[in-house]
Image: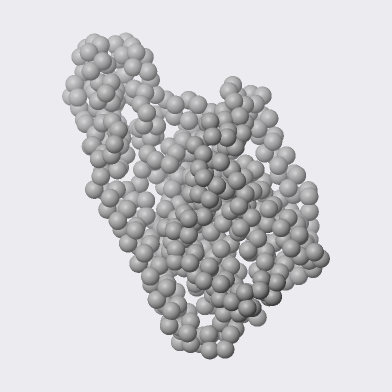
Amino acid sequence: MPLRVSSHFILTDRRSLWLLAVAGVVLCLVANLPWQVDDYDQAKQAFTSFQMVNQGRWLYQETPHERIATKPPLVGWVSAASYFLTRDWEIAWRIPSVLAGAGIAFLLFRAANSAFGAVAAVIALAAFIFNLITPRLATLVRTDMPLALVVFGIGLMIWDRIRTQTPWSTNDRLIIFGLLSAGMLIKGPVVLAFLLPGIVAFRLWLKRPVVSAFPGFWPWIASLAIFLLWVAGGVGTVTGFYDEVVVREFLGRFGGDVHRSQPLLFYFPHLIHKFAPWSLLLILFGLVEWGRTGWNIRSLQISAATRWLVLWSLGGLIVMSLVPSKRVDRIFPVIPPLCLLLGAQIAELLSLPAAYRVFRRWAVIVVLAAVLFSGSYTVWKVNSGYRHNRAALADFGKIVRQQVATRSWRYAVVSSPDESLLLYLHLNQFLLPQRAIEEWNSGKVDAIVVSNRDAPEVMGSLHPAGTISLKSGHREEDDTLDYLLVSKTD
């Protein structure tokens, strides 16, 4: 039964809830300001939806440098649909992550409130929002947040069936199939890595569970078949798909030759740091409960539903740790179940005599500390972004588009290592320097965008000679290029 707590407790006061909610929304929306797609492979993900809308490539796309896009297309579809509604690419690219983050927060709070009561629900929600990783991913143009929503939705259904001892129905299996299919079309079979290890471990831990954590074989097989159909179509119709997607992107993750390998325990310290202070509370509460048994692990009284939360979280973390190629964002799907596990620990502690009085003293302090910790980090990061002019290319692209629209120029961009430049200029492809020179000299373009590195070579071959109409702002980072808009008439 959910724990009933005094309505005078500040964290469950409606005004406090609204304050936390508003603070969380603001934190997540501003964390990546100034908005740009220069880093973390954001340009590659953004270009998929850009190609869908401008070139009709709805199933298989390329990167800005004309290599095969390696991610399935579902997130791109959502961004493309969002663009048709908003007519703004900066918003459309971020809508999948924003909506997924809001969905996780809603499901988490509702589940924790139903099972553990208002206090645990508020703490679980605060844990999900006020850390160092959720606000950053909330508006990042990547697939991590949508994947986490799918994984959390499936894991939550399993948890609810175990907690309520409700058998799996046909409708449940259809929902699982839909979610698994979505996961497959977001990031491929990695969705299985966050769920199947926990399901297998749960079956081994509970020799005769009342309700199975496994909803049946066909949803998993059918959803995998959908993904394999997409792969087969790519192999059969897209040149280089097999080498880029199957060999390099998928099989290459298990070796160190293609993707940089990281140590086995890479994720554990990063998770403790980026999920602080909640990660420390999870460990502390676990030690307290273990200590109450006299440090006898066999005497721990853990409900089947809580065991699933433990195995679900650790299973995904351990399996992803075994993959040599690692990046912190990739284990984000374990954060929501850890938040729900924290709610379960709080409900268990509050069932102890006098625990509520102690809890009142530290709970508000911990939440405020988390808000200040994550908020201060976000303020520092945003300030650093503006101070180092991190959005220089985005601003440059916007001004270029305004100038060429005002003067009706036909324009092109010379090939550059900055993949994002193509998106900022709203162009479909880069041109090699010689091709750009030919287009200029033949009168097909009136202006070109070129880096300061290539400008001497390119401008020396232009007939008629071009003039520099605009320079990009300088980004105060290592190995960055500046760009020029060269036109025939100033």
178, 382: nearer the viewer:
382
- Residue sitting nearer the eye, 414 or 1: 1
Is 113 situated above or below 155?
below
Q: Is residue 285 left or right of residue 17?
A: right
Q: In which quarter of the image is residue 337?
A: bottom right
Residue 132 drawn at (x, y percent): 42, 58
Res 30 quadrant in image: bottom left
Check the picture and name the quadrant holding the N terminus: bottom right
Q: How many labels does the image show?
A: 0
For this view, does 83 lie left or right of residue 323? left
Tell me residue 352's x, y (percent).
58, 85
Residue at coordinates 27% horizontally, 23% vertically from top-left?
453
Q: Which residue is most to the bottom?
A: 354
Task: List x then y, in percent, for residue 111.
Answer: 60, 69
Residue found at the far right of this picture: 208
Q: Can residue 111 be seen in this view?
A: yes
Task: Tell me the quadrant of the picture where the C terminus can be found.
Answer: top left
Give residue 366's quadrant in the image.
Answer: bottom left
Q: Residue at position x 31%, y 14% from top? A: 437
When the figure is inspected, residue 103 is found, relative to residue 389, above or below; the finding is below
Residue 483 vertical position relative to residue 146 in the rendered view, above or below: above
At x 48%, y 59%, the residue is 272
Q: In this view, does 58 lie above or below 336?
A: above
Task: Specify the color scheme.
Answer: one colour
Give coordinates of residue 412: x percent, y percent: 34, 23
**Is 383 positioned to the left or the right of 51 in the image?**
left
Residue at 53% x, 31% y: name it: 257
